[in-house]
Amino acid sequence: MRFFSVIFLLSFPLFAGAAEPVAECGAGKLYKIDDVPIVVVEGTWYEMGKQYGTLLKKEMKTLSTVMELGLMAFVGLERFRVFGEMAESQIQLYPKRFREIHRGMSEGSGLSLRSIAVLEHYLAADIAKGSGLFCSSVSVWGDFTTDGSLMMGRNFDFPGLYLQGCPFFCLTVFRPTDGSLSCATLGYVGEIGSVNLFNSQGLAAEVNVAVNMEAENGAIHPDRITATILLTTLGLDCDNITQCDAALKTYRFNFPLLCTVVDANEARTYEVGTRDVQVRQPDEPGLNTVTNWAYEGIVRDWEDERRGNLQFLANKYKGQIDQEKMKEILEMSLHQGGATIYGDANTFLTLHQLIFIPEKKSLSIRQPNYKKNPKWIDIDLNQFFSRE
C-alpha cells in the first residue's frame, strides 16, 4: 500500500536547525542525529506501530538476534525460554492501545509477537534477575541554577552485558491522533515502555529499581501491567505534575521502583511500592537526588557514596549550574567524586545519561561507555512534538 511505502532519502543531513528525515513511512519519519535514531510516529496506535516496525525493521531484527544470543548466554537456554513465554503473555495484559502498537510493529517489521515481546522486555530480563541495582539522578532548580530553571540529570546503570544494546539506542516520539499527548521515550529499539519519559507539556519521569522495600510492598507481580508501560501512560495522559501525582498514587506497579518526576517548577521522587506509594521530600529547596535502594554491602555503600557525591557537587556549584555544568558533573566518575560508573562488559556501568530542561523541552543524551570519545547529543524536542 502506498501509505506504508518507505522512502529512503539519499543522504543523512547534518543537524543544523530543523532536522530532516532520512526515511518516511506514511506519517511516520525517521531522523538521525549522529548515530542515534529518532523515530517519530503519528496516527492511530496500529498505524504508529506499523510505521515504527517498518522504519526500524533492520535494527529490530538485528537487536532481536543479538539480545537473544546474549541473554541465553546470561540466563541459560531454559530460563530464556521461560522468559520469552512470560514476555509474550505479559503484553497480552497491556491496554488496547499498546496491544495495537505491538500488532503494528510485528506486521511492519516481520517479527513474531514473541520476538516483539522479548524486545519489549529487554531490560526486564536483568531486573527480574535482581542485578539492576544502580542508577542515579540529580535535579536542580531555583538558587542552584544560573537562571532558576529546573534541569534533571540522570545516569542509567546496568550490567556490562547490555553494552550490546548501545548501537540500538533510540528516541521514540509518539504523536497519537486520539487526543492523547505527544510524548517521547528513550531506550532501546523495540521498547515502547520505557524507564525515561518526556512529554509535550514539559513533564518528564525516570525510574530506578528499589529492591530492598520490605517484602509485602516490594513483591513482584507478573499478573500486573509492567511499570515501563505505565510510565509511558503517564506521558500520554498527564498534563502536569499534579495529574502525574494522582496517577502514581492510583496505579499498582508490578515491581518496586523509585520514580522521579519533574516539570518546569519542581522535582519529586516517589517510593513506588507494589502496595502503596510515598512521596519523598527534596534534599533541600532546589535539590533532589536519588540513587537506587539495594542490598547491604558494596552496592549499598556505592549508593551512599554516589548520592553523597551528587549532593556535594550540586552545593559546590550552587548558583553556577547550567546545561554545560550539569554535563561536567555527570561526566565525573565515581572515583573522581561523581556518580558515573565507567567499566567494561564484566562490570556494572553507566549505559546512558540524560539532561532534560522542561522549560525548553531540551534533551541531551550520552552513552559514556560506548565508543572511545562519547559525546553529548543535544536534541530540541519541540520540533518533534509539534505536528506540521
Image (spheres, rainbow, N blue to C red):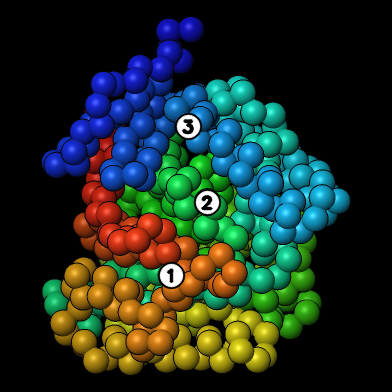
Closest to the camera, between mark 3 and mark 2, is: 2
Q: Residue at image x 46%, y 58%? A: 196
For marks 3 and 2, give the CA distance.
14 Å
Q: Residue at image x 73%, y 83%? A: 214
- Residue 182 visible in the current orientation: no
Relative side of 11 to 80, left or right:
left
How would you rate the neighbour count of disc 3 (Cα within 10 Å): few for under 14, some for 14-19, many for 20 or more? Answer: many
Badge 1 is on which residue? 155
25 or 237: nearer the eye?
Answer: 25
For marks 1 and 3, give the CA distance.
26 Å
- Amino acid under disc 2: Gly
Image: 222 above or below 209: above
Badge 3 is on which residue? 56
214 or 263: nearer the eye?
Answer: 214
Q: Quadrant of residue 182?
A: top left
For marks 2 and 1, give the CA distance.
16 Å
User: Which residue is at the far right?
Assistant: 78
Query: Sequence order check: which comes first, mark 2 or mark 1?
Result: 1
Image: 35 above or below 129: above
Tell me the element at label 1. strand
Query: Sequence order check: which comes first, mark 3 or mark 2?
Result: 3
Image: 33 above or below 342: above
How would you rate the neighbour count of disc 1 (Cα within 10 Å): few for under 14, some for 14-19, many for 20 or more? Answer: many
Relative side of 262 to 92, left or right:
left
Image: 151 above or below 163: below
> Where does the image place residue 215, in percent across and percent down from the top left?
78, 79
Do residues under tags 1 and 3 come within 8 Å of each other at their CB atoms? no
> Where does the image place residue 284, in percent across and percent down from the top left?
35, 90
> Where does the image place residue 174, in percent across and percent down from the top left?
42, 38
